[in-house]
Image: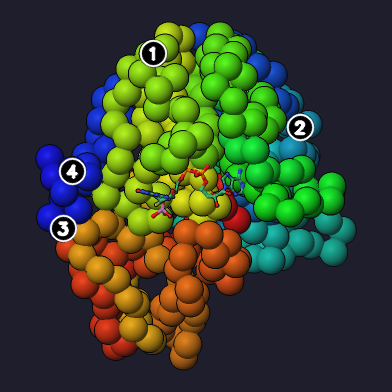
Amino acid sequence: MDCCDAPGLMPVEQALTQMAQTVSAVAEKEQCDLADAFDRVLAEDVASPLDIPPFDNSAMDGYAFRFTDWQANNTMPLAGKAMAGQPFTGDVPVGHCVRIMTGAKVPEGLDTVVMQEKAVVSEDGANVSFAEVKQCSNVRYRGEDVKAGDVALFAGDRLSPRHIGQLACLGIGKVPVCRKLKVAIFSTGDELKLPGTPLSEGEIYDSNRFAVKAMLSRLPIEVRDFGVIPDDEAQLRQVFADADAWADAVISSGGVSVGDADYTKQILDEMGDIGFWKLAIKPGKPFAFGKLPHSQFFGLPGNPVSAVVTCDQLVMPTLQKMMGWKAEPALGFEAELTARLKKRPGRKDYQRATATLVDGQWQVAGTGNQGSAIFSSMISANGYAPLAAESAGEEAGQRVWFEPFAEWLK
Ligand SMILES: Nc1nc2c(c(=O)[nH]1)N[C@H]1C(S)=C(S)[C@@H](COP(=O)(O)OP(=O)(O)OC[C@H]3O[C@@H](n4cnc5c(N)ncnc54)[C@H](O)[C@@H]3O)O[C@H]1N2
Ligand code: MOO
């Protein structure tokens, strides 16, 4: 399908759908200690092995008794103590109350707890009176949070601190997780130098590999970095083969355009299948997706902003699916634009933008020069104002959609 004024270019949404349909989730599972499970992707539904809470317990520090005993006599002798972890043992005699702490098991047969602030203790400490009592108050019942057998967490959940807390509540020490995805990365280009080394004329620093590696490191992914590969067809072919033999996904940057040293397309064509090569996205039109003999291939454009934005918008959602992670769509909101955003119709444009809260209202402004080599446009931004392919720019005062940067860009 062509995209309006960008003939021959596939729309972003179509590309995302095609990629999602092409890839599948890693099949291998492993058992992981709870202590190491943070950030991993759950491979199976987890049903609770027990009721949570496992026993009726007190929600307050106070006194427990039978409501009917209190109705008979609102002053009751103390029969003993129930502490968290040290339950009251034996039977509570009729007409008696028990001193109880928050989290302590409510003794057998008792049904009501009154907080200590609402109790009056006799001078000798032997009796306690309660003026006002609501039946069954301040008791947390067995299974009221999660019942044994209920599915508490689902296959495809990425284990956040909240999920880790839930697994711990359930007493689960070993967690079934998906194997970590293996992703190989490399940059291509004779002009690229390692940061920290001096530049000769015509050279620049390799920024894409570092940015992409940092993004991948935010997810449960094993990254293998093949470094910078010069514009040499034979070397490039060897790296493609080595990366493919090891990885589930290979991500290169540079060499996907039409320049004399842009060998990537030719190699992918020979070794595997090209899914698509050009998209109606800005920045990042020459973005490649394809299949190598063993792995999926993503070819990021060389320009640094294009590389980061296409990795963020196209590669990361596809890797999420490969990781087995059933991720939610990105959150966003509408906000007022404070200055014009320039754009030509044709490609969906991920304008780097800053959202600011002014007098309780969100306002959005672009970050200036949106050139695909202007990396500083990423730095003052805290998200995107994505403009639809057909948009011819947006005026100040209009409301635009704003998407905060995903966790891996922060
Ligand atoms: N005749 C045409 N020329 C170009 C087109 C086109 O359609 N026709 N597309 C332009 C667009 S859009 C982009 S984006 C780039 C993509 O080019 P490549 O992916 O082939 O990348 P290179 O040519 O290797 O590099 C482009 C640019 O980016 C710099 N670069 C490359 N790798 C890195 C890196 N790892 N870190 C930092 N900077 C990098 C490189 O030095 C170039 O300046 O093509 C346009 N040209
Ligand atoms: O990918 Mo290019 O972003 O349009 O410079």
Viewer-proximal residue, 59 or 120?
59
Q: Quadrant of the N terminus?
A: top left
Foreground: disc 3 or disc 1: 1
Residue of label 2: 85
Q: Position of residue 169 (x, y in %)?
A: 61, 31
Q: Residue at x 22, y 42 (%)?
A: 10
Point out the tag, 2 or 1, that comes first from the N-terminus.
Answer: 2
Point out the tag, 3 or 2, that comes first from the N-terminus.
Answer: 3
Assess disc 1: are there few (<14), some (14-19) or many (≥20) residues with their C-alpha within 10 Å of its C-alpha.
few
Amino acid type, callout 4: Gly
Amino acid type, callout 3: Asp
- The answer to whether one can see residue 163 in this image is no
Distance Cα–Cα, label 3 vs label 2 = 70 Å
Foreground: disc 4 or disc 2: 4
Q: Residue at x 76, y 32 (%)?
A: 85
Assess disc 3: are there few (<14), some (14-19) or many (≥20) residues with their C-alpha within 10 Å of its C-alpha.
some
Point out the tag, 4 or 1, that comes first from the N-terminus.
Answer: 4
Residue of label 3: 5
Amino acid type, callout 2: Gly
Residue of label 4: 8
Vertical placement of residue 24 versus 125, above or below: above
What secondary structure is marked by label 3?
A: loop
